[in-house]
Image (cartoon, helix red, strand yellow):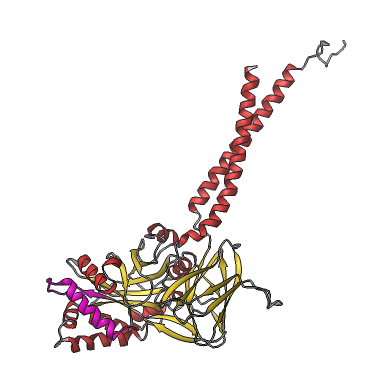
Amino acid sequence: MIADISSRVRRVLSWSILCLACAGLLLMGLAERDARAAVLRPVPEAPLPFARHKVVGLDLRSFSSLESLQWLQVGGVQPYALLMVQVDSDIVTALTQPDDQPSALAAMDQLVAAAQGTPLAVCLARPVVAVGGLAIAQAVAEALVERYPGAIAYVLGCGVENSDEWHRDLSRAIRGEDAMLPPDVLIPMSAGASLTLFDAAGNDSLGGADILGRLPGTDRYSAAVVTVTRPADEALVRHAREAMTSLAALALIVVQPERGVDPAALSASLSGVGLNTALLPEGFTSVTAPGVAADGDWILSTVGTVPYARTTTNAAIALEFVGTNVFVQALTSPDGGTLLAWIDPPADDPTVSPVARIDLQDDQASDTTIQIATGLLGKRHRLVLSAENAEGQSVSVSGVVVTGQAAPGSIAKLAAAALLMIAVLALTERALANIRSIRESEQLRPTRATGHPRVFKR
């Protein structure tokens, strides 16, 4: 009786474990599908103030202003989406002095000219004078904002001592006390989303797992800084492209060359790293990217270093992506029109209703993020945006954000292996229990008293 009850308990327990393992595998698959959107949440309201589809930036903060200028003149800027250069402390100090400001601006003009239109992130070295840090930061910020609103995307503080305090002073001067940014975050000078810097693991190469493990968070765009001692090899280029394609929160791979690296050779080795594809990657994509097709009367304009496609007519934009969620980043304003959106519209039915109708009219101009669709199947989709403007109205779009690529699966694979092992053990236990049951039933079966079947007569 006790053995029978024990057998029943084992049977129920084994089948329960098996069902839980199968349910776990199913839920894990659904969770992975849902986790795709968690790579960047919430999506920042502001767009990125540089061309993310170029994938790489250049970090020259370890060089002086003159060395940075010489580097850019020799190596060029063609592959880079963002250039990080240091502005020496004597230039920063001179920007605050009316008599010395013209010479300081002349030095800045040379750096801006060498950038050839590529957005700059200027690392302002802390002035020697320590008194009145906030006042100095305000004077420097005013000089830069007035002269270079369309050239400088970001500002950050540099310096051997008290650089964190200097960075905070700059943040207060540009953004105000209530929106101050920490020292590892680049400060947008006029428009665009902020950017957190973090060091990627290893030199001269990187992997998606390394970046994902060091990613500061998913509530703000981040840039991975990779130190290089030679021109980029095939592995670095491949890993950079893969990481930028699959991680929405990753805004840029920034290469930081050590002294002795050839500027021209490094630029040449990164010339083919861009995401020049018709299929939009994970994360933010600007309206200037190759995968965005504009139809109609769109005019390209910029606010700071952020490009916007603007129309006063009923023009359209079309693009394709793979993902489960898609957002549009546009500009609301007093003269904002209406933006219509379709997901996978049938080509033979132009009368199909849009999935979203967004009124872009607001009291003041500001960037906004609009969720067009969520929970889509993880396959290729087509998004069509169309402007609907009355007289005096306009629609301005800065880009699209896609989330929904598969998350890195190392942990998921381990979980799947564990669940499968549990399922195998449960099935094994059931098989052994059935074998024992068969053996017990055979032993209890009555035997015939006829002796051995093989009886030989002599």
Q: Which residues are magenta?
A: 123-150
Q: Position of residue 33 (x, y in %)?
A: 56, 57
Quadrant location of the C terminus in the rendered image:
top right
Left or right, residue 271 beside residue 230: right
Quarter-wise, where is residue 198 in the image?
Answer: bottom left
- Report whether residue 192 is seen: yes
Quarter-wise, where is residue 199 in the image?
Answer: bottom left
Q: Look at the picture and state if 289 lies above or below 426.
A: below
| Residue 440 or residue 211, whichever sits in front | 211
| Magenta run includes residue 148 | yes
Quadrant location of the N terminus in the rendered image:
top right
Q: Position of residue 241 (x, y in %)?
A: 47, 70
Q: Residue furthest right?
A: 457
Residue at coordinates 83% horizontally, 16% vertically from top-left?
453
Residue at coordinates 29% horizontally, 66% vertically from top-left?
178
| Residue 185 or residue 346, whichever sits in front | 346
Left or right, residue 273 beside residue 57: right
Left or right, residue 103 beside residue 49: left
| Residue 159 or residue 444, whichever sits in front | 159
Left or right, residue 423 beside residue 209: right
| Magenta run includes residue 437 | no
Q: Look at the picture and state if 162 lies above or below 145.
A: above
Q: Position of residue 23 (x, y in %)?
A: 60, 44
- Report whether residue 273 is seen: no
Q: Position of residue 26 (x, y in %)?
A: 60, 48
